[in-house]
């Protein structure tokens, strides 16, 4: 069915940066009422600089009026620092992704997918294909590499996203709140899930 965006929602961005592998950044909002993560946009690049990825991220955020409450990424700290620089980089701040307990994190993500609490917009073709075809290596220590799909980097980006979402924060302002209306996204978006 269709997934209608609530008037008040928190946006998140999550990335897995690579050069030989893909760089993937996912943009999602959290549906507090239904406890769903809804991925609406992805930025994907292969053999491109962090500056280019950052500029693509900035473009997505500006075009869709997205202001993430958190951005997380698996990337070297120097790369994250370069991306955050307001004049030399795109000025987009990512925090390091939580990477401990990777097996547990992947099991939690698998559960969220199986219980349909992860919704993916059809335009996110890289994420959809990675979720559909991603496979483990023989030792089950990491994802197998693939010529057409890289290192299944969108799965890791989604894993970090799943951990970054604050499921306890209700984005709806309380009655009489002095919170600015600009703090929330009020646009309506619908698509098939």
Image (tube, grey):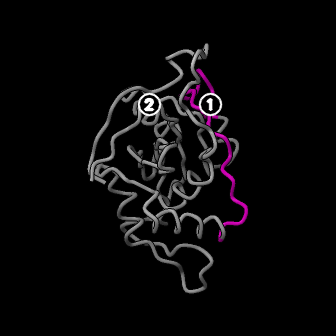
Q: Which residues are magenta?
A: 82-103
In the image: residue 99, left or right of residue 131? right
Q: Provide residue 75's location: percent of width, then percent of height.
A: 63, 49
* Element assignment for label 1: helix
| Mark 2 in CB contact with mark 1 (< 8 angstroms) | no
Residue 11 position in % (x across, y down): 50, 37
| Residue 78 placement: quadrant | top right
Residue beneath disc 1: 84
The residue singled out by tag 2 in the image is 61
Q: CA distance from mark 2 to mark 1?
A: 15 Å
Number of marks present in the image shown: 2
Depicted 134 relative to depicted 57: above or below: below
Q: Nearer the viewer, residue 69 or 140?
A: 69
Was residue 92 drawn as part of the magenta stretch in this picture? yes
x and y percentages locating residue 186 in the rendered image? 41, 26
The picture quadrant where one finds residue 177 is top right
78 versus 58 height, above or below: below
- Can I make out residue 21 in this image? no
- The earlier-in-sequence mark between 2 and 1 is 2
Q: At x 52% / y 68%, what residue is drawn?
A: 110
Picture residue at 37% right of the left edge, 30% below the top? 64
Is 91 covered by the magenta stretch?
Answer: yes
| Quadrant of the rendered image containing residue 77 | top right
Q: At numbered mark 2, what does the secondary structure look like: helix, strand or loop?
A: helix
């Amino acid at each position: 069915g269709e997934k209608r965006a609530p008037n008040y929602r928190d946006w998140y961005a999550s990335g897995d940066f690579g050069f030989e592998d893909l760089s993937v950044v996912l943009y999602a909002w959290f549906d507090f009422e239904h406890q769903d993560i809804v991925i609406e946009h992805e930025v994907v690049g292969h053999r491109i600089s962090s500056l280019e990825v950052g500029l693509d991220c900035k473009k997505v955020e500006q075009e869709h009026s997205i202001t993430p409450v958190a951005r997380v990424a698996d990337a070297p700290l120097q790369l994250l620092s370069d991306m955050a620089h307001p004049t030399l980089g795109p000025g987009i701040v990512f925090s390091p992704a939580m990477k401990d307990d990777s097996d547990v994190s992947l099991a939690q993500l698998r559960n969220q997918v199986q219980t349909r609490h992860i919704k993916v917009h059809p335009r996110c073709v890289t994420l959809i294909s990675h979720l559909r075809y991603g496979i483990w290596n023989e030792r089950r220590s990491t994802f197998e590499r693939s010529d057409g799909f890289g290192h299944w980097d969108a799965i890791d980006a989604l894993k970090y996203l799943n951990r970054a979402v604050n499921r306890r924060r209700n984005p709806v302002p309380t009655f009489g709140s002095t919170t600015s209306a600009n703090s929330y996204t009020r646009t309506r978006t619908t698509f098939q899930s």
